[in-house]
Amino acid sequence: MKGRIVYREDCAKDEHGAAAVYQELGANPTSVQGLNACLAYGSVPGNSSSAADAVKAYVQALLSSKYKTWMELPPELRPKHWRDKFVKPVVLLVKALHGHPDAGGLWEQHLKKIIRNLGGQEVPEYPGNFFFPDTKLLLSTYVDDLTLAGPSDQHDAFWAKLTSVADIEPPEPIYRILGRNHLVMPLSRTEGSEECAAFRAQEALVFDMLAYAHQTVDLYKSITNTKSLKHAATPFVPEGSVSVEDEEAKGELAPNACRILMKALWLGRLSRPDIIKPINDLATKVQSWSRGDDKRLLRLIQYIDSTPQYRLVGTIKDNPEDLELRLYVDADFAGDRLSGKSTSGGYLVLYGPNSFFPLAWVSKRQTSTSRSTTESEVVSLAYSLYQATILVVCKGYSPKLRHITRTHKVNLSGPSEVLRETQPSLNIVKPTTKLRTSSPRRCHPKSGPRHCAY
């Protein structure tokens, strides 16, 4: 067990005895996508990744707030010789103690100043990520978690410089970051998948959250007193299994639904794109939870319990000049059962002849109702099953699409304009949908350079 001394914001008052108001300095740590991009950079041949934690990060920064903060020390922290002198002693807070609303922002400012003095330049698209032009290193910061990627021969010198100006633990090879384990392991060859044999002979970075998946299931079991769960092949309930009566009756899990969904959402955000959509669908029902939603949540947990070993795998074995960004997008037409709105899905990867590294994924309900599959795919920039979508985007708006709403017109004209201005560096193509499966992996032997995905 370990403890932490914190500042109690809940009972802080100003000089008039009213609740204290703070600057609320915003912190802007790296995103999951920013971390993935950093790890992808570290996987490029000749590069590597390492990580270190800042020691007692917040108190390394001074509490340089606009107004001074005075603290009443609890009896166990007061010097013994104070006991007979003071009744309610207070002291000036000079460090950004954990719990103070400004502590996170002040630590971030402190760390950024140090990094900039070392030559780091913040990446505009990924706040919290810093690039060092001289050494070609990329540093990703998430509060006290520091992840470094770049040329292997530059890591030791950088960590030595950083530890000379900040209290940092000794760097180690990357493993657990943001609650996600990172394993470097070979992709073993699977019988019957000769097309991907060369790819699988390589080493890959695995985003592993097996233990967290089990924790998510255990949380559900503890709340519902469930002993065992049935196998589920998908996270969605079968058609017709939820009745009208189920939709009208209040669900038993209404008080705890948000807690379970938030637990599952972190799993989806870090390593399981396959569960993002059902989680988002259920999240919209938290305020009006029904017995039907109980069934849908049960199905989601059954699916997670049946597939805890599923994880993302990324590998990069090509030179940077042979790599490109590929964005795979699609939409489910009128997938929402109540509003009839579609859901946009996207999957961004770093791609090459021998490379496939996941960077970001998203599932988002569209804000406007589509009247056809083509419209829903235009909104989500789909590389769709229907060639019509690509033709529409390439050509732009036409009188044949006069029925579409203003929102969809904007969604169409935007990508159409970008496509015209950036060709041939940016292009849109229709991918093949033919899959060859060999459990538990899926291989795509026909879609350009071969790659596999767990």
Image (cartoon, rainbow, N blue to C red):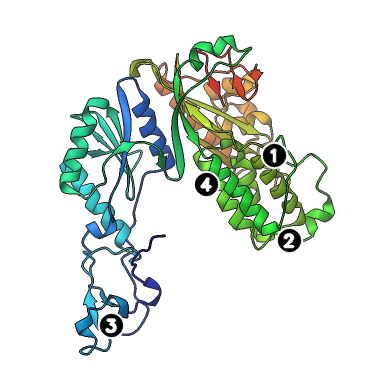
Residue at image point 20% right, 49% down: 166
- Position of residue 52 relative to residue 248, above or below, is above
* Helix, strand or loop for disc 4: helix
What's the residue type where badge 4 is placed?
Answer: Trp
- Label 1 or label 3, whichever lies nearer to me, is 3
Res 74 visible:
no
Q: For mark 2, does the 10 Å Cα neighbourhood hold few (<14), some (14 to 19), or many (20 or more) residues?
A: some
Image quadrant containing the C terminus: top right
Q: Please identify the quarter of the rendering in which residue 260 is found.
A: bottom right
- Relative image position of residue 238 (x, y in whole percent): 78, 39
User: Which mark is nearer the camera, 1 or 4?
Assistant: 4
Question: Which quadrant would the N terminus be assigned to in this image?
Answer: bottom left
Q: Is residue 128 left or right of residue 85?
A: right
* Residue topped by disc 2: 252
**Nearest to N terminus: mark 3 or mark 4:** 3
For label 4, the crowd category at 10 Å Cα-Cα, with few meaning under 14, some 14 to 19 and many 20 or more, is some
N-terminal of the pair, mark 2 or mark 4, is 2
- On residue 387, which mark appears? none
Label 2 or label 3, whichever comes before in sequence order:
3
Relative to 431, 327 lies left or right: left
Q: Residue at x 84, y 55 (%)?
A: 245
Label 3 and label 4: CA atoms lie apart by 41 Å
* Residue 91 against residue 279 in the figure, above or below: below
**Mark nearer the viewer, 2 or 3:** 2
First-in-chain label (1 vs 3): 3
- Look at label 1 and name its amino acid: Gly
SS type, badge 3? loop
Q: CA distance from mark 2 to mark 3?
A: 47 Å
Q: CA distance from mark 1 to mark 4?
A: 24 Å
- Residue 15 is labelled as 3
